[in-house]
Amino acid sequence: MLAKKKEMVHKISNKGFTAKDVENELERFGVTKVFPEVLQFHENSVNLLKMYHDTERLRTCDMYHALERCITAAIFLYSKEMQDFYHANLSCRSRLSIECSVCIEETDAKEAAERNASSSDSSVADRTNKMESSSTME
Ligand SMILES: [Zn+2]
């Protein structure tokens, strides 16, 4: 029973919890040892939960979600395969709300394609104008 308790998220008091508490829990569970990068996400995850619930007083179940989000984000960063997996399942931005290199690449490519499309449009327009002006000259 005691061993099970050790693995469990600490019950949060009525005061709620802070990013520092999430950091302490991540350390207590040994997550920071396995994924030191996990500490990039704890503040953001707490802020997102506060915004989502529109409260400063987060509960024990929110602590669980904060930890889950941090750990998932750390796994995401762990390898390119994991990033591809999350991205393919649309959980990079919507679920984790973290910067995804695949999303950024795709957005850049899309923007570049749009720029190319608009610039080739104008060149088509230029050619049409030239053709029109040359035909009027005849
Ligand atoms: Zn993505």
Image (cartoon, rainbow, N blue to C red):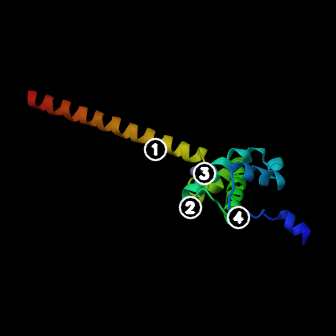
Image height check: is 119 above or below 32? above
Point out the image quarter for the C terminus.
top left
Q: Do the residues labelled 2 and 1 touch (CB within 8 Å)?
A: no
Residue ID for mark 1: 110
Of label 2 and label 4, which has the lower sequence position?
2
Q: Do the residues labelled 2 and 4 touch (CB within 8 Å)?
A: no
Residue ID for mark 4: 60
| Nearest to the observer: residue 46 or residue 119 | 46
Report, in whole angstroms, how far the alpha carbon at label 2 lies from the one at label 1.
34 Å
Residue behind label 3 places its C-beta within 8 angstroms of ligand 1? no
Report, in whole angstroms, how far the alpha carbon at label 3 lies from the one at label 2.
10 Å
Residue ID for mark 2: 53
Please state which amino acid type lies under the numbered disc 3. Asn
User: Which quadrant of the structure image shows residue 86?
Assistant: bottom right
Locate residue 64, reporting x and y percent: 71, 62
Of label 1 and label 4, which has the lower sequence position?
4
Please state which amino acid type lies under the numbered disc 4. Thr
For mark 1, give the secondary structure.
Answer: helix
Of label 3 and label 2, which has the lower sequence position?
3
Of label 2 and label 1, which has the lower sequence position?
2
For mark 4, give the secondary structure.
Answer: helix
Q: Do the residues labelled 3 and 1 touch (CB within 8 Å)?
A: no
Compared across the picture, whether 42 is left or right of 48 comes to right
Of label 3 and label 1, which has the lower sequence position?
3
For mark 3, give the secondary structure.
Answer: helix
The mark lying in front, picked from 3 and 1, is 3
Q: Which mark is residue 96?
A: none
